[in-house]
Image: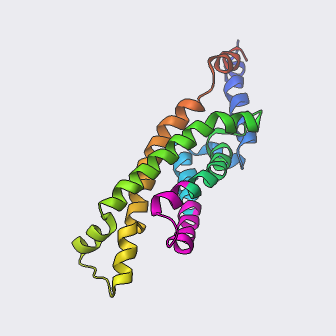
Amino acid sequence: MTSEAASKPTSAAADEQRRRLFHPSLAHIPMALRFVLSGVTGNVFFMAFYNYSYAAFQSVASASRIFAVVQFLCIVVNHFLNVGIVFGWPDNYLASLSSNMPVGLASLALGAFTMDRLEQADFDGRINSWSGEKSADVQDEEEEKKGGFYASIVVMIVTGVFNYVALNIVNAPSKDKKAKEKEL
């Protein structure tokens, strides 16, 4: 076997991955960086959606409940970003989404729990007090106690680390698929 023939499986696998990502150039970026790109994009969308929802519904729901609903709706968006930027488009999108759904739901529970604990601890109020920021009136103080920007960042970091580990396990190529790539 020539060295050219030996390199074909790697080239074929790389071509397949490039074809399945949103853009072929994404395959040239290391997977960990693509995961960060997908995560940042998803989190920007989530944060905008969460902050809009929080402003609209804070008078009728706690920050942790608003977080849970918004994150549930973002599971599909984040899966779409992950397959298009990180892992490549699956042969069966719905099967892939359903296998990733437990990770999204576990992340949702972890995020809602973390947000609830931070809300109960008045995390944003403590950060504002520590940084020297003072509220102008009682309404601002009440908003800080319900959860906000700093608590959202902590939750984003906690759920991001969880998702990175869990999604790399769930979306790892099966042993059968790895064996077929070696045979090529």
Image quadrant holding the C terminus, namely top right
Give the image location of residue 64, x and y in percent: 46, 58
Name the chief secondary structure element in magenta.
Answer: helix
Give the residue furthest to the top: 1
Give the residue furthest to the front: 60
Asked if residue 30 can be seen in this view, the reply is no
Q: Where, by quadrant of the figure, is residue 135 drawn? A: bottom left
- Which residue sits at x=73%, y=33%? 95
Q: Is residue 57 magenta?
A: yes
Depth check: 152 or 33 in front?
Answer: 152
Give the image location of residue 85, x and y in percent: 64, 47
| Up/down of 133 relative to 94, above or below | below
- Which residue sits at x=53%, y=61%? 66
Asked if residue 180 can be seen in this view, the reply is yes
- Which residue sits at x=29%, y=60%? 121
**In this figure, which colouring scheme has been used for the structure?**
rainbow
- Which residue sits at x=41%, y=60%? 153
Depth check: 90 or 142 in front?
Answer: 142
Q: Where, by quadrant of the figure, is residue 5 drawn? A: top right
Image quadrant holding the N terminus, namely top right
Q: Is residue 58 magenta?
A: yes
Depth check: 53 or 9 in front?
Answer: 53
Give the image location of residue 31, x and y in percent: 55, 41
Give the image location of residue 47, x and y in percent: 53, 64
Provide the residue span drawn in magenta: 45-68
| Up/down of 56 relative to 178, above or below | below
How many numbered marks have been drawn onto this rendered protein structure?
Answer: 0
